[in-house]
């Protein structure tokens, strides 16, 4: 009989958590030569000057090499990248900020926006499902905001194509307290006992199914409390149990790093990275970030969105921006990826069978075709209605 090797299989439990191992793992250093396309490495975090990489993103081979470096950092090295100047023009940032603050003001007097992850309710302003709310309220602003090739490349580097964008805005006012150290969705939103029910390989897989990001909507000096990060902590196997442990959280508080950000910068990190929003000790900075949580086509997103309604709202805007030369084809594709459902499954294969391939057309493919052909709004709405009918059980 062949004896089983349980190194990859089996389960984590509380006894699997070794603080000394965690300290050694998170005391590594990222050497600049390991990330040759980064402009610099600061506190073990590689910073990429996107002004230098605009042309990189328009060249398929160069773009792939950059994304391969990002994927290595996210998966096997520090676990976090910073895209400096992800928005060359911050006008779409300001336009989105105006929309978000309108929503915040409205939700303060309603029932929405209550509660938060890993922080006390009322310590800040949170917009759940800011993606759909922004798209339906200001579709042109949404197109200009998410028609961003740097953001799209970061998402694709970790998740591949057909990812599902979701987003939640977080505004932390002066005096807003820090979050507790944590990992993120999926297993990061489970208790330690529940996380222990999943086999070891599921702990590894879950980190490949989402990507966390933060888009800075204002300048964020250290006193405003930018995200606290612990590089290399995503490599720690039992981390989905350990972040609940006080000793591991204490080490996080001792060893974490923070980086100031400028408006238009973006940070992306592995969801298994130990992290926490910082305390806003400033006198007058309302720290506003759009927290994007991007899901693989093969996973389950945390929020439900009406992507058909979003696609209907976005379609005429994209046609206008594309035909008017205000968005490139690559930027249009990035906006579509942030809006429409890119994966054609699940569906009803009796009524929505694959024709000429292994999969039927996705919502994103239909939107891209409608933009490319300049289809009118009514015709595209009928196309989406027909798709919904075909996919119904």
Image (cartoon, helix red, strand yellow):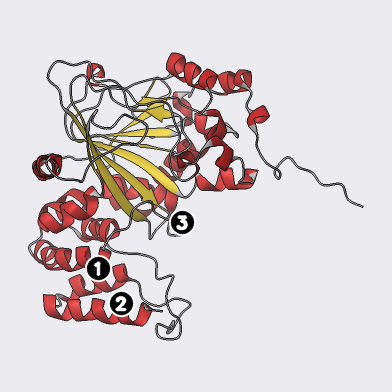
The answer to whether any part of residue 62 appears in the image is yes
Q: Secondary structure at mark 3?
A: loop
Percent x, y for residue 182?
A: 44, 31
Residue 181 horizontal side relative to residue 306, left or right: right
**Numbered label tally:** 3
Q: Nearer the viewer, residue 274 or 148?
A: 274
The structure residue drawn at horizontal position 21% and vertical position 24%, both measured from the top left corner, is 220
Mark pair 1, 2: CA separation: 9 Å
**Which numbered disc, 3 or 1, marks the residue that appears first in the sequence?**
3
Proximity of marks 1 and 2: CB atoms separated by less than 8 Å: yes
Q: Secondary structure at mark 1?
A: helix
Q: Vertically, is 110 above or below 318?
A: above
The structure residue drawn at horizontal position 20% and vertical position 81%, both measured from the top left corner, is 382
Q: Residues within 10 Å of mark 3 (few under 14, many from 20)?
A: some
- Of the numbered discs in the image, which one, if any, rests on residue 308? 1
Q: Vertically, is 174 above or below 314?
A: above
- Of the numbered discs in the image, which one, if any, rests on residue 388? 2
Which residue matches tag 3? 299
Percent x, y for residue 363?
A: 30, 70
Q: Nearer the viewer, residue 94 or 126?
A: 126
- In which quadrant will I find the C terminus? bottom left
Q: Residues within 10 Å of mark 1 (few under 14, many from 20)?
A: many
Percent x, y for residue 238?
A: 60, 33
Proximity of marks 3 and 2: CB atoms separated by less than 8 Å: no
């Amino acid at each position: 009989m062949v004896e089983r090797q349980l190194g990859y299989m089996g389960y984590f439990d509380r006894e699997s958590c070794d603080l000394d191992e965690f300290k050694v793992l998170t005391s590594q250093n990222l050497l600049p030569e390991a990330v040759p396309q980064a402009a610099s490495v600061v506190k073990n975090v590689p910073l990429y000057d996107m002004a230098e990489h605009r042309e990189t993103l328009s060249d398929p081979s160069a773009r792939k090499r950059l994304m391969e470096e990002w994927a290595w950092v996210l998966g096997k090295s520090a676990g976090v990248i910073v895209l400096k100047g992800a928005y060359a023009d911050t006008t779409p940032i300001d336009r989105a900020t105006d929309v978000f603050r309108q929503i915040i003001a409205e939700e303060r007097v309603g029932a929405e926006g209550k509660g938060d992850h890993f922080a006390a309710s009322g310590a800040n302003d949170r917009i759940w499902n800011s993606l759909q709310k922004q798209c339906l309220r200001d579709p042109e602003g949404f197109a200009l905001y998410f028609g961003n090739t740097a953001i799209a490349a970061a998402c694709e580097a970790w998740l591949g194509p057909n990812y599902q964008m979701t987003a939640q805005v977080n505004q932390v006012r002066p005096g807003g307290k820090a979050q507790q150290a944590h990992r993120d969705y999926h297993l990061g939103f489970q208790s330690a006992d529940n996380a222990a029910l999943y086999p070891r390989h599921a702990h590894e897989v879950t980190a490949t199914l989402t990507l966390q990001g933060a888009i800075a909507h204002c300048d964020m000096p250290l006193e405003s409390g930018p995200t606290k990060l612990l590089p290399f902590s995503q490599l720690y196997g039992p981390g989905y149990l350990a972040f609940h442990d006080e000793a591991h959280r204490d080490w996080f508080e001792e060893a974490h790093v923070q980086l100031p950000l400028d408006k238009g910068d973006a940070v992306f990190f592995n969801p298994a990275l130990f992290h926490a929003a910082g305390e806003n000790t400033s006198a007058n900075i309302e720290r506003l970030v759009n927290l994007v949580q991007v899901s693989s086509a093969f996973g389950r997103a945390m929020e439900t969105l009406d992507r058909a309604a979003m696609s209907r709202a976005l379609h005429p805007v994209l046609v206008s921006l594309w035909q008017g030369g205000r968005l490139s084809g690559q930027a249009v594709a990035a906006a579509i990826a942030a809006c429409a459902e890119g994966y054609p499954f699940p569906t009803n294969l009796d009524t929505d069978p694959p024709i000429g391939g292994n999969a039927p057309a996705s919502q994103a493919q239909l939107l891209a075709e409608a933009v490319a052909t300049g289809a009118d709004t009514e015709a595209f709405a009928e196309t989406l209605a027909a798709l919904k009918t075909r996919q119904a059980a």
